[in-house]
Image (cartoon, grey):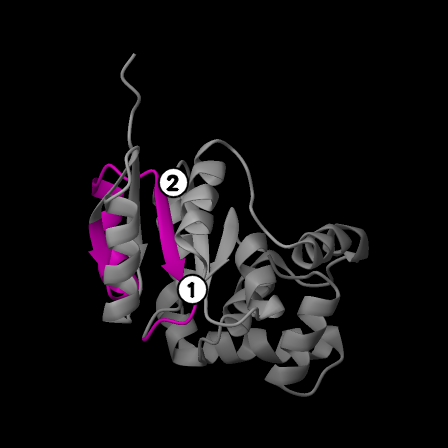
Amino acid sequence: MITKNISVSIVEDNDEIRQTIALIVGGTPGFECNFTFSNAETALEEVPDLPVDVVLMDIDLPGMSGIRGMKKIKEKCPEIDFIMLTIHKDEDSIFQSLCAGASGYLVKESAPVDILRSIHEVFNGGAPMSSSIARKVTDSFHKKVENPLSERESEILQLLCEGLNSKAIAEDKFISPETVKSHIKAIYRKLEVNNRAEAVSKAHKQGLTY
């Protein structure tokens, strides 16, 4: 019986890391890695048209973040699984990635056997993550409170949490910057906060973002 190779794509701005992981994956029987990208923007344009099963996506990319890039690709290709790559075990970033749709995460210094095992696990429906992250994800479902924001305000709050400024939010939502500012004021008022940092912090603590 012929077994299908797992097709892996890598989105990583560090050339050495990207090439090293590509060699590990592509040189292992049962896997193939024919598509690599140095930024999320290019991946967003090309991945939806490629035969890709699993994407290894760096969280900290120049320009569009890995988390945002993953979300946009999954909107077009929900069947693709994502494993987020990180240098440090930044629990907040990993947590945001998983809540946004990632299936697991890998530390970039992971041993080749761990990289391959994680890809295989995700491809077969698993979700490789540490126990501390798993607990954080579980706790988030118990801590969710009633969201006082409208659907549009919640969307804008999510973009604020992803680091977008008012102009970028306006372009993303096809509304004017003035309308964005009006929504942000309403968000601050409803959450009883005074600035962006406080709004983002409260959103994470109360489970108002995904």
Q: Amino acid at mark 2?
A: Ile
| Residue 139 place in picture, x, y as percent | 77, 55
- In the rendered structure, which disc, 1 or 2, sits on the residue that comes first in sequence? 2
Q: Which mark is residue 49?
A: none
How many angstroms separate mark 1 from mark 2 (CA)?
20 Å
Q: Amino acid at mark 1?
A: Lys
User: Residue at left 56%, top 62%?
Assistant: 94
| Residue 121 magenta-highlighted | no
- As displayed, is residue 161 above or below residue 28? below
Tell me which residue sits at (55%, 37%) in the image. 126
Q: Are marks 1 and 2 in contact (CB under 8 Å)?
A: no
Give the camera-side residue of 63 and 147. 63
Tell me, yes or no, whether the highlighted magenta stretch contains residue 44: yes
Residue under circle 1? 108
Residue 98 seen by the camera: yes
x, y (%) of residue 54? 37, 43
Q: Relative to the observer, which residue lies in front, 198 or 128? A: 128
Crowding near pointer 1: few (<14 within 10 Å), some, many (20+)? Answer: some
Residue 102 rendering spot, x and y as whole percentages = 50, 50
Q: Residue most toward the bottom?
A: 194
Compared to residue 124, the image places residue 35 above or below, namely below
The answer to whether residue 208 is left or right of residue 123 is right
**The C terminus: image quadrant:** bottom right
Q: Quadrant of the N terminus?
A: top left
Instruction: Residue at 69% x, 87% y: name it.
Output: 194
The front one of 177 and 77 is 77
- Image coordinates for residue 100, horizontal then vertical, percent: 53, 54
**Which residue sits at x=44%, y=56%?**
111
Residue 174 visible to the viewer: no
The magenta region covers 35-62
Q: Kindly identify which residue carries mark 2.
A: 80
Which element type, helix, strand or loop, lies under badge 1?
loop
